[in-house]
Amino acid sequence: MGWEEKQVRGYPEFVQTAQRYHGRPIFALFCGDKDAEGKSWCPDCVTAEPVVRKELHNMPDESVFIYCLVGDRAYWKDPNNEFRKNLKLTGVPTLLKYGTPQKLVEEECFKAELVRMLFTED
Amino acid sequence: SVQAHKEGKPQKLLEMNGQTLMPHSYDYDLIVIGGGSGGLAAAKEAAKYEKKVMVLDFVTPTPLGNSWGLGGTCVNVGCIPKKLMHQAALLGQALQDSRKFGWQFTEEVKHNWMTMTESVQNYIGSLNWGYRVVLREKKVTYENAYGEFVGPHTVKATNKRGVEKLYTAERFLIATGERPRYLGIPGDKEYCVSSDDLFSLPYCPGKTLVVGASYVALECAGFLAGLGLDVTVMVRSILLRGFDQDIANKIGEYMEEHGINFIREFVPIKVEQIEAGTPGRLKVTATSTKGDQIIEGEYNTVLLAIGRDACTRNIGLDKVGVKINEKTGKIPVNDEEQTNVPYIYAVGDILQDKLELTPVAIQAGRLLVQRLYAGATTKCDYVNVPTTVFTPLEYGACGYAEETAVEKFGEENIEVYHTHFWPLEWTVPSRDNNKCYAKIICNIQDNERVIGFHVLGPNAGEVTQGFAAAIKCGMTKEQLDSTIGIHPVCAEV
């Protein structure tokens, strides 16, 4: 079946989507919002996204890749935002395997080898 | 001078480390068999010196089918989950104490095993993942495969699907650690659990029989009881063999006074299942070590903690001529962790006559690699290594036990200073006022140098660490006396 991508924005939409695909491997990339020209306020996210996208074909069959925009910079900086509180995210970009402690944060997302390891790890 | 040192270095390395003078083209500079505390520390250190390193780590599943990720015993089924569960038990006690300090809550406080276990396992999972990332970033090749020697400089790695690969290396480090021993009685592997299973048990163990008197047995019995379970400990002879027996007995007494049952001088002879379940019901039959008496008991879980055996018998050591102690399975090494085969080294719990502690393995692994690849000469110091037993009443120690000091120096040449103490935090909730205890053992012939430090009380590990550094510096009783205490803390005594 291969894999499919879902694009979401904000915490409630993320949770709803993750729950809908319960039972399938779910990977999520969290990035800062993009402006009208499609550029994110988060420079590391701009660097990481193409690296991650290039490795998506390594995800196991049936995987769901959730591309999630977290919000604007002010929202992200708030230490009580739902992503920080509930998902324990500490930075953007974060790439994680949902429901496991496996994740890559910030510069780790720039490394194709690490991204590949996350997607293919047993 | 620096110049001379640089020139002299390669020469020294060639002489000291058994390096062959004709370079072969091996796959790797170093292959580490075992991805635990010692193995990973050594691998990461070797990568720092740009060496090509491979780590082979594989967990043979327990008799009940349990397995775990990269990191070894300490991270997965040892120190880490143990300390977290010990903390869970301490928090239970703290909740009880808190009422006396004014906290009001009406509900009966209960413990949920699954909640605790999930959190602990989640943390362990993050450690396993962390190691994967670190090894990848440092370009250390990692394979989840069982490594065994098949010939000189060659290992075979077999993964869980049975796929075999061969790898060669200039040097090898054996760091395969140990696994719990079974009793060899009917029902032991089918129905009993070990520490390899306990920390991820997917159901509350219920009424538990702990067989053994090692620190593993007592620590597990301790936290299980602290979580509210009915716990019995079956002991063949003495408690905490190898530790100061005066303190070992105090620990046993404390545990007994706090609701843990002890059956002394008995050994199990069979375990039968009365009813399957999670947990089920088991019947244990035991015989006295001192006569014919037979007893029976019913428990939900039987935890075996009677010792650990080195994983050295099935890794092909005979194929490369590495000598092991046939009786214990341990590997004798020289003071540079080298086996009888010059290009094969070993660290960690598998070493003969060395302490089985994570920090020791890490230190030995790191220093070994520094000697091999960075021209260092420092050897691992195995003397005066501090340790702590996380029983309900914690015990920290560094140096000689009292009886060992007496044996070595003679009773007339040592002086023991000791005291009971009552932690201030225990006064208000009316906890025991005569259980905490501290003693130091001094060598009269050497300026009353402190050669043994023992403390029984809360946060024993934290207390002991600083004193270990002082002992390493050769602290004498006079120096200790002239150090003003911090008040009010237990450590001031």
Image (cartoon, coloured by chain):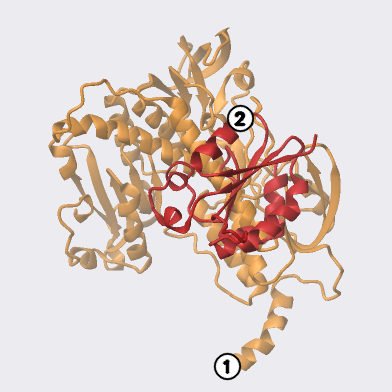
Residue occupying image coordinates x 47% and y 46% = A83
Mark 2 Cα within 10 Å, few/some/many (few <14, many 20+)?
few
Colour in which the image shows chain A: red
Q: Secondary structure at mark 2?
A: helix
Q: Along the horizontal axis of the image, is B315 left or right of B482?
A: right
Extreme residue in the top direction? B274
User: What residue did someone put label 1 on?
Assistant: B1
Which amino acid does the dot numbered 2 rest on?
Arg
Can I make out residue B339 in this image?
no
What chain is tagged by disc 2? A
Q: Can residue B8 be seen by looking at this rendering?
A: yes
Say above or below: B92 vs A120: above
Q: CA distance from mark 1 to mark 2?
A: 69 Å
Return the mark for residue B123: none
Choose mark 1 or mark 2, whichever is in front. 2
Q: Residue at x 42, y 47 (%)?
A: A81
Give the residue number, with chain letter if any, for mark 2: A20
Chain B display color = orange
